[in-house]
């Protein structure tokens, strides 16, 4: 909320495509019993309870009021430019995700064939959506860590969030086209060559989708159909493979290898390396 009794714990925010746009902002709200209000122009806001025990809320938006006992994972959705008021009893532990309306419409234009400028979201009180809950928790986990090294992953999460909101909570339910069969071999190799040539750089989902002139959402689906892994998972695998080569063939410092392979720190490399290989970079070098 904008006026809590205790300043909320603000986490990092991430810019997503289009480049000049902050597509998503994630905030972890920790407040004692109280009340607050917000009015975000141009941003849709998703509130999700993280409290381990149910907490009673009174909420008001769009001329309607709702009172309920919110369990962990329960969601409220506030469309852009909608004043929202809440009063809560007990300690609040809540995730706030703000998604740019401009980004939502950008995703809609990329994925559906209709007048996307008229699409908006419907207000929701105390709803439960396992997909949105899962996306929210993954966003929170990434923003609490070294998010800058996982740009491709965060781009993917943000796009999936937008598509889920369009599918389930829009004023009109857009029909999203279905693509099957994966990417043609020529296009797949074009993407793989690009990834290989830019392993040491920040790779965005939009960069890869733009190579093939398709939406980010559909690119991600087709890529996974082709290789069985997401673009982000493939990128991590390739970075780890390059790190393995450096570890075996050179005596360079591990921190230098991490940066050369696109990881943002020694610890970032170690975490991803262990997930892929089951051992640390140091143990792999000495094995």
Image (cartoon, rainbow, N blue to C red):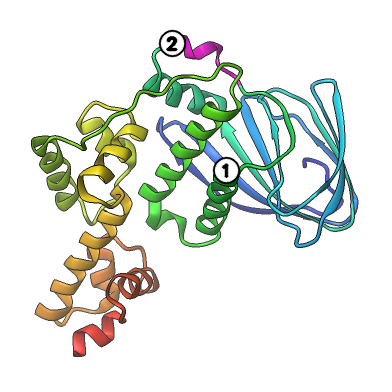
Mark 2, secondary structure of its residue: loop
Label 2 crowd bin: few (<14), some (14–19), many (20+), radius 10 Å? few
Total marks shown come to 2
The x, y position of residue 133, in whole percent, is 60, 48
Task: Report the front residue among 242 and 65.
Answer: 65
Q: Up-down: is 148 above or below 176?
A: below
Specify the quadrant of the image occupied by residue 1: top right
Q: Is residue 118 magenta?
A: yes
The x, y position of residue 207, in whole percent, is 27, 37
Q: Which residue corresponds to the image point at 38% horizontal and 68% vertical from the top-left?
A: 268
The x, y position of residue 78, in whole percent, is 70, 30
Q: Which residue corresponds to the image point at 87% horizontal and 57% vertical from the top-left?
A: 32
Q: Which residue corresponds to the image point at 79% horizontal and 21% vertical from the top-left?
A: 62
Q: Up-down: is 64 above or below 259?
A: above
Q: Up-down: is 270 above or below 119?
A: below
Residue 114: numbered disc: 2
Q: Is residue 48 magenta?
A: no
Taking the view exactly as shown, the residue that stands out farthest to the bottom is: 286
- Taking the image as shown, residue 237 lies to the left or right of residue 148, namely left
Specify the quadrant of the image occupied by residue 252: bottom left
Disc 2 versus disc 1: distance between alpha carbons? 24 Å
Residue 9: numbered disc: none
Task: Report the front residue among 173 and 232.
Answer: 173
- For label 1, the residue is 132
Which residues are drawn in magenta? 114-120
């Amino acid at each position: 909320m904008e006026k809590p009794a205790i300043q909320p714990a603000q986490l990092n925010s991430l810019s997503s495509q289009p480049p000049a746009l902050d597509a998503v902002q994630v905030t972890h709200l920790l407040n004692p019993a109280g009340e607050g209000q917000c009015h975000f122009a141009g941003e849709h806001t998703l509130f999700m309870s993280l409290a381990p025990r149910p907490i009673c809320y009174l909420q008001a938006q769009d001329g309607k009021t709702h009172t309920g006992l919110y369990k962990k994972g329960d969601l409220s959705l506030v469309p852009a430019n909608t004043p929202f008021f809440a009063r809560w009893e007990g300690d609040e532990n809540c995730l706030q995700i703000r998604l740019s309306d401009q980004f939502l419409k950008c995703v809609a234009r990329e994925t559906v064939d209709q007048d996307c400028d008229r699409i908006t979201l419907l207000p929701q009180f105390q709803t439960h959506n396992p997909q949105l809950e899962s996306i929210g928790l993954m966003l929170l986990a990434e923003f609490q860590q070294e998010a800058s090294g996982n740009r491709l992953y965060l781009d993917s999460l943000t796009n999936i969030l937008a598509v889920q909101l369009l599918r389930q909570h829009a004023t009109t339910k857009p029909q999203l086209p279905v693509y099957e069969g994966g990417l043609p071999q020529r296009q797949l190799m074009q993407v793989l060559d690009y990834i290989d040539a830019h392993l040491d750089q920040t790779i965005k989902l939009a960069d890869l989708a733009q190579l093939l002139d398709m939406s980010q959402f559909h690119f991600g689906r087709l890529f996974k159909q082709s290789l069985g892994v997401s673009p982000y998972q493939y990128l991590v695998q390739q970075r780890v493979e390059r790190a393995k080569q450096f570890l075996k063939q050179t005596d360079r410092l591990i921190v230098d290898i991490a940066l050369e392979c696109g990881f943002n720190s020694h610890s970032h490399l170690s975490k991803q390396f262990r997930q892929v290989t089951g051992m640390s970079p140091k143990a792999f070098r000495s094995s």
